[in-house]
């Protein structure tokens, strides 16, 4: 089922566990080294940055190869282009299988790119040949994404499979008539929550051990979708656009209060549940969706001006963060404000500094007439009169 | 971590019983860390507060009175700086940790409000007269001093942004291509000079071991600015593009050495992508402008991209091996 060597996938899990245990000092460096030796992984797995580079280059090669082939063989006509595109997609897929099976690429950028390109070429080709409806497109996307998820264990394509499944339900249910239209959000929420609980339960089961990350991303997508499906803004604007309700500004959809309730209730439920079950994913998504509440509310009601809202919101956040940090100065109920020993992406790459520089609005570029430090540095250019 | 795995490892004799106990203990007593959540909250709070105050001041200028506003903002930054200098750990040229988790954000709030203060002061009272450069120069100075004095990478990034603004360039990731007009020669030359300057600063920082953890921030800003400005020069000076391409190759070579020295895959990726853009421009330009090729030129350029793409993949794969081996 899985294209990758499963023995190595198993070993990779062991290696990662041992590495994190070693970083925490639970097992000694020597023990970790023997474990790494005893559980060898033969995959070609380059550094993440090299992976990005290989991804971009593979996409470039695939695109220009397709361009070359279509220039050589095409004599016009959408249908011909469609067949060629599908043919090319199949070739890309074969390349992918070769890279994975004989060259042992695993998340190397090359296999990622080939997978996406194969899917894109096949879907585009099908659309060139026949006039596909949106439901049909959703079904095709789902089939391809599902297949790739099962075979290549890719997280993002797993999320695509999940979303396209929801799209199939949404688009085909709408056709059933006015009652269906009114109940769409609830049906979607029902299905999303069912999928959520299913994957939540399956997560960590031994038979799905290779799919842990795929399931996690589906769970995240489900949490966000569940909020969006009940969100007042999303429901009102979608039904207004799709069903031609012609709502005026200030007019509400029928039973709008239900969606207002859901909009406010769901993120708070997430945060509460995340803290109770010590579930980081649910907690973080809940916190993130608070922003969703604020935007939804402010889109329709302007109780206070933006600057007052910003200032008071800022003060509340600072006080809350301060109080919580003080409260958790010594760990309580299993919570701490200290950095956990798990290494974090944010620490290693000072993302924070870049965000600060980006959000900080630099003073407007001033005309540099005074010829101080940097003025004349570069021969002719620097001394030129300021052109701002 | 799962206990079962470690039990198996112990049974296989790969870890000692003591190590197994440690992993089990760690798993049982794992604390749930809210560190990043609280930090994000605090940062968002500071951002909202300073932004909100900024707009508030702007909208109510007529009713509150300038002096009152100025005094208020002055109190915010003065209070913040006072708090920070009271709390800070002794200065050192090495990395100094923040005394508590609020320190960084109070410093940030002080710095931002100081900049608002200077800007507002100039706007209302023209304290610096027509010397606009000073309006960016003074905050820049304060930011650089604060960054070193209090050891804050975020403030250092702000200082570098300000330095660039003072030289006439927007440098932050989202703005560098949007705001700057890279068709103007003076922007290109300023960009190159500033890029070289920042890289030199990073170099000195490392060499003299003066806050050597600041090096990455300098080098990173400098590298992107220098590459983008040089690429702009290649695009702009259509007669001299070959000369500028040689310059680009030189810069790429410097960073190639740099990537190997610091074992940085990030620098490796950046130099590869920037050089590839430059090379592709030069080749395509050569095919169509110099050779005046028609259909054959299109085939040629398609082949160029396929072949160089494959070549660069080989290059990255071998470099990946090389850097890992160091």
Image (cartoon, rainbow, N blue to C red):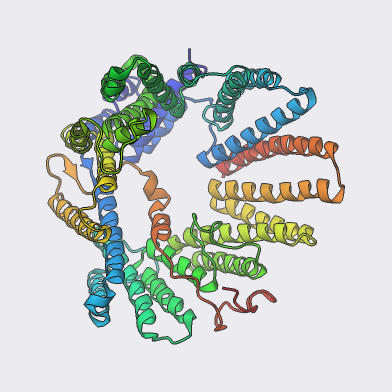
Work out whether B115 lies above or below A246. Answer: below
Q: Is residue A196 visible?
A: no
Residue A305 coordinates in the image, percent (x, y): 24, 58
Residue A326 coordinates in the image, percent (x, y): 14, 54
User: Is B320 placed left or right of A264 in the picture?
Assistant: right
| Residue positioned 36% across, 66% down in the render | B151
Query: Which corner quadrant of the image does residue A79 belong to?
Result: top right
User: Is A157 placed left or right of A332 in the picture?
Assistant: right
B49 or A178: nearer the viewer: A178
A209 or B62: nearer the viewer: B62
Q: Which corner quadrant holds the C terminus of chain B?
A: top right
Q: How many marks?
A: 0
Residue B158 coordinates in the image, percent (x, y): 42, 65
A308 or A30: nearer the viewer: A308
Q: Which corner quadrant holds the N terminus of chain B?
A: top left
| Residue positioned 66% across, 22% down in the render | A85
A304 or A355: nearer the viewer: A304
Work out whether A115 lies above or below A336. Answer: above
């Amino acid at each position: 089922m899985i294209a990758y060597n499963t023995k190595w996938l198993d070993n990779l899990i062991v290696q990662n566990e041992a590495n994190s245990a070693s970083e925490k000092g639970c097992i000694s460096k020597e023990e970790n080294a023997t474990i790494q030796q005893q559980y060898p992984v033969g995959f070609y797995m380059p550094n993440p940055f090299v992976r990005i580079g290989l991804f971009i280059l593979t996409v470039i090669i695939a695109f220009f190869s397709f361009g070359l082939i279509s220039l050589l063989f095409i004599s016009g006509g959408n249908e011909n282009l469609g067949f060629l595109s599908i043919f090319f997609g199949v070739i890309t897929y074969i390349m992918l299988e070769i890279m994975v099976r004989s060259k042992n690429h695993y998340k190397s950028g090359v296999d990622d790119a080939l997978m996406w390109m194969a899917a894109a070429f096949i879907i585009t080709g099908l659309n060139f040949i026949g006039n596909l409806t949106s439901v049909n497109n959703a079904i095709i996307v789902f089939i391809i994404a599902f297949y790739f998820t099962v075979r290549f264990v890719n997280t993002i394509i797993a999320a695509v499979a999940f979303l396209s499944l929801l799209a199939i339900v949404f688009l085909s249910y709408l056709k059933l008539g006015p009652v269906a239209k009114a109940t769409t959000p609830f049906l979607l929420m029902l299905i999303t929550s069912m999928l959520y609980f299913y994957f939540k339960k399956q997560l960590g089961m031994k038979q799905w051990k290779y799919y842990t990350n795929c399931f996690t991303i589906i769970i995240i997508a489900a949490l966000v979708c569940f909020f969006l499906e009940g969100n007042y803004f999303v429901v009102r604007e979608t039904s207004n656009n799709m069903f031609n309700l012609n709502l005026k500004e200030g007019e509400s959809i029928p039973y709008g209060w239900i969606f207002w309730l859901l909009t406010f209730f769901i993120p708070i439920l997430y945060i509460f549940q995340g803290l109770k079950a010590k579930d980081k994913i649910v907690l973080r998504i809940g916190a993130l969706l608070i922003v969703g509440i604020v935007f939804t509310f402010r889109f329709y009601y302007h109780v206070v001006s933006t600057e007052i809202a910003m200032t008071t919101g800022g003060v509340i956040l600072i006080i809350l963060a301060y109080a919580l940090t003080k409260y958790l100065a010594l760990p309580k109920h299993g919570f701490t404000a200290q950095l956990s020993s798990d290494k974090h992406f944010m620490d290693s790459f000072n993302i924070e500094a870049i965000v600060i520089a980006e959000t900080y609005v630099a003073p407007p570029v001033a005309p540099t007439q005074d010829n101080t430090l940097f003025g004349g540095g570069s021969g002719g250019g620097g001394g030129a009169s300021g052109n701002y | 971590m799962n206990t079962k795995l470690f039990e198996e490892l112990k049974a296989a004799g790969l870890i000692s019983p003591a190590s197994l106990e440690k992993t089990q203990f760690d798993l049982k007593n794992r604390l749930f860390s809210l560190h990043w959540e609280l930090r994000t909250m605090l940062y968002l709070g500071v951002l909202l507060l300073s932004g909100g105050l900024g707009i508030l001041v702007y909208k109510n200028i007529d009713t509150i009175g300038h002096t009152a506003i100025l005094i208020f903002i002055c109190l915010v930054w003065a209070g913040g700086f006072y708090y920070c200098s009271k709390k800070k750990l002794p200065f050192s040229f090495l990395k100094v940790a923040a005394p508590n988790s609020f320190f960084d954000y109070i410093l940030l709030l002080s710095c931002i409000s100081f900049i608002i203060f200077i800007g507002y002061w100039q706007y209302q009272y023209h304290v610096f007269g027509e010397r606009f450069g000073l309006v960016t120069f003074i905050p820049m100075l304060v930011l650089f001093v604060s960054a070193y004095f209090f050891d804050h990478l975020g403030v250092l990034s702000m200082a570098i942004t300000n330095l660039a603004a003072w030289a006439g360039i927007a440098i932050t990731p989202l703005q560098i291509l949007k705001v700057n007009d890279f068709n103007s020669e003076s922007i290109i030359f300023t960009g190159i000079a500033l890029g070289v300057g920042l890289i030199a600063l990073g170099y000195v920082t490392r060499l003299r071991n003066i806050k050597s953890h600041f090096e990455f921030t300098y080098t990173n800003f400098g590298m992107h600015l220098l590459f983008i400005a040089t690429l702009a020069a290649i695009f702009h000076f259509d007669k001299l593009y070959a000369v500028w391409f040689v310059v680009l190759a030189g810069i790429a070579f410097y960073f190639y050495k740099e990537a190997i020295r610091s074992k940085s895959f990030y620098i490796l990726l950046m130099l590869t992508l920037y050089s590839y853009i430059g090379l592709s421009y030069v080749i395509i330009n050569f095919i169509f402008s110099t050779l005046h090729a028609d259909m054959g030129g299109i085939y040629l350029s398609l082949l160029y991209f396929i072949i160089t793409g494959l070549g660069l993949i080989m290059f990255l794969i071998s470099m990946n091996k090389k850097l890992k081996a160091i």
